[in-house]
Structure formats: structure tokens, C-alpha cells
Image (cartoon, helix red, strand yellow):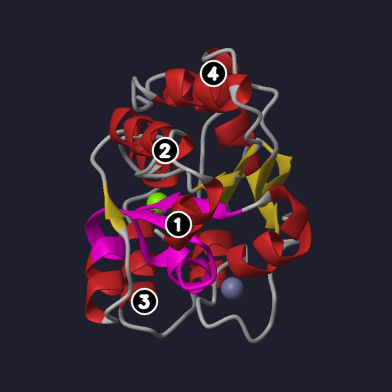
Amino acid sequence: MRIFCDFDGTISRSDTTDFVLTALADPAWHEIEARWESGEIDAAECMRLQVAMIGGSETDLNTVLDRVELDPHFKNFVLWAEANGHPITILSDGVNHFIKRLLTREGLGRLPVFANVLAGQAGDWGLEQPWMRAGCAGGSGVCKCEVVRTTAPETEGPVVFVGDGRSDFCVSAKVDILFAKHRLAEYAAARGAEFLPYETFADVTATLNGFAAVPAKQACAV
Ligand SMILES: [Mg+2]
Ligand SMILES: [Zn+2]
């Protein structure tokens, strides 16, 4: 089993970038958000424009990040997966520096992260998007379906994805086991796609632990 997890709203309780923008950017960042919501710009451009609006020093940024709360059950989920030999990868349309700092705080800095890359320096932040793919329906800075396709060898068994939002739409139809909540659950339900509802990583751990107890073929069919 190979596990991929979204970050914002899935591992973190709120959207980390929005949390940083609320604390350190001109309120005009909401106008950029509205342009994305209306479809005028895609998610990738929205992120580039918003990250460029983050003010304050690097210390200010880190102080704000340190207030972001994670799902308290995520760490135990990682320990369970590692103990059972299931690699976990973080796939996020957020910002790598933010995610790495939060994971490191929890003692989980070893997890691989695919996300937009923070560039520049305080007062002049920019964003690089090495995982963007033209043609991805999501229009995100990180095409999650492409990362899964290129990094999950079939020999590692079923692919699990845990997510909650729009940036997960592109990957959600291409995995074997989908855990979904909020917007992602609505999307999967509207498409008639099978998914497992969850609220916290305690639910995800319990469900996957149940699969591990049945023969592999049955688990794959779920
Ligand atoms: Mg999310
Ligand atoms: Zn994609």
C-alpha cells in the first residue's frame, strides 16, 4: 500500500496559506481569491499572486506558521503506516516551506513533500511550481495525478489518497482507495465515485488497519 495525503484542510485544520495571508498580507488577497473562485484565474496563478503579497519578516512568518494546528491524530497515523511498511507522501498545492516547518514541529520532517516551492526572501516572496502540468484539469500549481503516476510503482500495491478539496479532484479518480471529506466528498459523490468518508486521521487509521486484516485481493477491491 502506498499512501498520499493532501495537506491543507486534511492534515492541517485550516488552510495554511490563507492563515498566513490573513496575518501578514494586505486584505486585497481576498480579491485574488475571488478571481480564482470565479474562474478568471487558475489556482496556480492565484497562489503565485497571493504568496507575493505576504509581508513581514521571516521571523514573523515563522511565528504565524507555529500557530497552525494539525490533526492531532496525524502523527499516530504516520507511525502506524511506517510500522506496517506503507510509505506516505504529502501532495499539496500549498507551499513547501510552510508544510516542512509544521511537519518538523511534529517530528515528521522526514516525510517527502511535493508542493509549490517558496522562492525569494521576506518582503519579496515568490513561488516556483515545478510540479505544474499544462492540461491538468485542476489548473493547480501541483498536478497531483501526475506525481502519483510517476512516483507510485505498481509493485507497491494499492494507492491510497486522503484529501478534502478542489486541488484533489484531478487525482481522486486515479487512485485505488479514496478517503474524502468536505468538497472532495461532494465531488466524488456527484460523480458516483466510491470513497470512504472520514473526519480525522484516527478514522483513516482504523479503516486501513481493518483492510490489513483481510486478504490483499479483497482489500484492493474496496
Ligand atoms: Mg486540502
Ligand atoms: Zn492533475
Amino acid carrying label 4: it is Leu
Q: Is residue 165 visible?
A: yes
The secondary structure type at the circle numbered 4 is helix
Amino acid carrying label 2: it is Leu
The secondary structure type at the circle numbered 1 is strand
User: Which residue corresponds to the image point at 60% horizontal and 80% vertical from the top-left?
Assistant: 136
User: Which residue corresponds to the image point at 45% horizontal and 62% vertical from the top-left?
Assistant: 221
User: Mark 3 vs mark 4: which is more N-terminal?
Assistant: 3
Q: CA distance from mark 4 to mark 2?
A: 13 Å
Q: Quadrant of residue 95?
A: top right
Amino acid carrying label 1: it is Ile
Q: Which range of residues does the magenta coloring cover? A: 158-185
Circle number at residue 21: none
Q: Which residue is mark 3?
A: 35
Q: Respond yes or no on whether mark 4 lies under 8 Å from ligand 1.
A: no
The secondary structure type at the circle numbered 2 is helix
State yes or no: discs 2 and 3 in contact (Cβ < 8 Å). no
Amino acid carrying label 3: it is Arg
